Amino acid sequence: MTLRGQSKYFGVDYLVIDEMALIPRNTYEMYLRPTLSDRKGWALFTSTPRGFNYFEKLFRRGADPDYPDWESWQFPSTISPYFLDDLDELRKTLTDETVRQEVLAEFTSFAGKVYPFNRFQQIKNDLRYDPSLPTYIGLDFGYRACHACILQVKHNTDGLATVFQIDEVSMRNTKTEDFAKKIKSLGYTFNGMYCDPAGAGVSIQSGVSDIYVFKQHGMHLKYKKDTTTRNVVAGVGHVRRWFEDANGDPHFFVAPRCVESIQSYENYRYPEHREEQQLKELPLKDGRFDHAADSLRFFYVNVFPMRSRMAGVIDYV
């Protein structure tokens, strides 16, 4: 095995990883994949699917002629002689998505997810920056991971709004100073910049707040302090209506370049052991998929206040 921190690296011949869908991409690429290089070793990944994440991309290589050394297999539980459950009976007690993922070993949008994101409907290849539309940004701070969603709003003739996410900034293990510089370097002119109210808190390390750092770079961040806006459960419910309205239609679309955001919307979820109370509890703060979801929520609760209808006038703080 590889011993990091030593003067030498010792490779491995065989690497077997179970539940690969739960392994962060960086863990494999930075720490596990290099162990195979010295000895030309091979790896075997097994897992229950968990949405369209990194494991799904690796699985697809088995059918891709550009990866001739890869092979993939799919083994649904129903082919096992020890599978005794009646599939029709399972469908009476479990959601279709859960059955497809947990029993049939299919890649679906992750069961227990917070937002009903549909990549086939909501990812739009033709989304580009439109200088005629108002442009906004929602930001979530953090040293380990920080994220910004860049969005534009378009109203139709009836006054109903559609939101387009045209870009993102996702950074890890970085300082607020670098985060601010990166956002400013994109060159967008923002009609509003919204963030986590916690960004007003003074950092022990720097002695200033995240909001103050952005102000030093000519960017003025806003947020709302009222209890309704800061209620995470209420905010999540508010955002869900943009992913899917009462008729099942989305009013929120994403450009394919927003890779981190898309993964977040597909994998942002509730704790699995409380799945029956999804809408009554907080989503999981896993440090992987919550940052983009939070930054999107900060945009929505500020630009489209929860006390107003979706067609309401944009409310500047």
Image: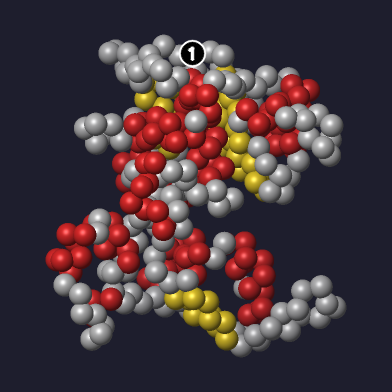
Residue found at x 23% / y 86%: 81
The image shows residue 109 at horizontal and vertical percentages of 35, 53
Look at the picture and state if 273 lies above or below 66. above
The image shows residue 43 at horizontal and vertical percentages of 53, 80
Instruction: Classify residue 184 by image quadrant.
Output: top right
Residue found at x 53% / y 28%: 230
Q: Is residue 132 visible?
A: no
Instruction: Pick the residue in front: 305 or 231.
Output: 231
In the rendered view of the protein, which quadrant contains the N terminus?
A: bottom right
Residue under circle 1? 315
Residue found at x 26% / y 63%: 99
Instruction: Pick the residue in front: 176 or 71.
Output: 176
Please give left or right for residue 259 compared with residue 179 in the image. left
Instruction: Classify residue 71 by image quadrant.
Output: bottom left
Please give left or right for residue 290 compared with residue 184 in the image. left
Residue found at x 33% / y 74%: 74
**Secondary structure at numbered mark 1:** loop
